[in-house]
Amino acid sequence: MEYVTETILLALVVVTALAFDFTNGFHDTGNAMATSIATRALKPKTAVALSAVLNLVGAFLSLAVAATIAKGIVDANIITLEVVLAGLVGGITWNLLTWLLGIPSSSSHALIGGVVGSVLAAVGTSGVLWTGVLSKVMIPALLAPVIAIGVAALGTFLVARITKDLPQDTTSRGFRWGQIGSASLVSLAHGTNDAQKSMGIILLALIAGGAVPADSGVPFWVVLACATFMALGTYLGGWRVIRTLGKGLVEIDSRQGMAAETSSAAVILLSSHFGFSLSTTHVATGSILGSGVGMPGAKVRWGVAGKMLAAWGLTLPAAGLVGAFCFWLQDVIGGVGGTVAVFTLLIGVSAAIWIASRRKPISADNVNDEWDGDETPASVVDAAETFTVVAAEATAEAEATVAAAPTATRREGVPA
């Protein structure tokens, strides 16, 4: 009976990890294609289809980031399936909330925050490899957007100087063709980095469930499944985030678009080579801002950028609080019932966010409409802060329940 329960739990964790990969796909499509769509180098649906195919291919090119997630952030030897599931729910919830608000936040940091939060709730600080978090996550998170801004600003400035005497129609037409190549390279780079994260999480789950040894590499079926779900999510097109990146930060032309995309691809590919689990969203956003900084006379909407920056700062702690709450909820209820309760909660939250998104839908038909100055809600930061407060209150209530119910069912090997 215990074997059957463990198998069901492992299956739920794998399904949830693939669901995260799916949300990652549509949340991060804009990283590669927002500028090409904004400059009309590619039609919206053509852009997301191309990005989906190249994300699929890119997922097979490197496994360095998967190893970082599976073995470089938390101690795989003390991870349980409940911990992994709780972390995934934290990552998915933040992904969906920021997608609803049209904020290009980091799926990578949402996932890592959720997993770290659930590990802290389960075993305390000893379960987190803080050196790995600092060197593989925090430092790249700080440096990547700054580097991307600098590279894109320099590239845009040079391109603007070289083409200043050429007719605008000629440069626009030529650089739109160039954008197809540069956007494709970003999609390929995105696949080499972001698809690996769910692979690493599933490998963690397989190790925790005893399905593979602790020193195992990523099985081929995991690579194939994650690549496929990432591609499917990408094909849906995260139109809300695409609109913010393509129209909300900078009024971008094809020269800026190509410079931004090329800069993003270079930074992402370099980080993938070294196994850094950086945020492709941070890189892409930094590149777009850099294209505005480097283009003489361009207008950068720093107010929109500031709201995005605030959401970035909340990503790790907010997702971590949800991950911690979900672990405690499983621990309080105990057994399969706790796991089913968390999984049901995820479905309910996802459905509620999707219903809310239908009130003001954004699709391929209106993603390129002119940007309204008041379009990004003034309450974006307030919404993120409210999310954090609610998660903290729920976590506190769950902790109090655990303290009041010491006889609650717990998994062997996970301390109270």
Image: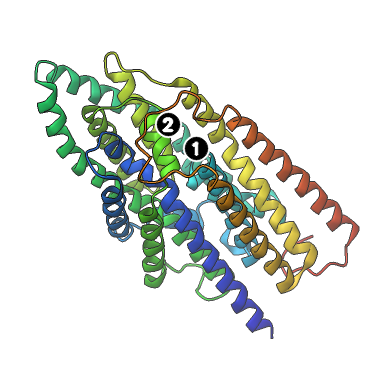
Residue at the disc numbered 2? 143
Give the residue type at disc 1.
Ile
Q: Is residue 148 visible?
A: no
The image quadrant that residue 389 belongs to is top right
Of all residues shown, which one is farthest toward the bottom?
1
Measured as percent of width and height from the top left, residue 261 is found at 28, 37
Instruction: Identify which residue, 373 or 330, lies in the foreground.
Output: 373
Q: Quadrant of the C terminus?
A: bottom right
Q: Is residue 401 visible?
A: yes
Measuring 24% from the left and 24% from the top, which residue is drawn there? 156
**Marks 1 and 2: which is nearer the front?**
1
Count of numbered badges drawn on the protein? 2
Lower sequence index among marks 1 and 2: 1
Q: CA separation, marks 1 and 2? A: 20 Å
Q: Is residue 385 above or below residue 94?
A: above
Measuring 69% from the left and 86% from the top, which residue is drawn there? 1
Give the residue type at disc 2.
Leu
Q: Secondary structure at mark 2?
A: helix
Measuring 47% from the left and 36% from the top, which residue is drawn there? 141
Q: Secondary structure at mark 1?
A: loop
Q: Is residue 25 above or below residue 178?
A: below
Measured as percent of width and height from the top left, residue 351 is found at 59, 56
The image quadrant that residue 278 belongs to is top left
Q: Is residue 331 left or right of residue 166?
A: right
Q: Is residue 273 left or right of residue 113?
A: left
The circle drawn on residue 103 is 1
Mark 1 neighbour density, 10 Å: few (under 14) some (14–19) many (20 or more): many
Measuring 42% from the left and 34% from the top, which residue is drawn there? 244
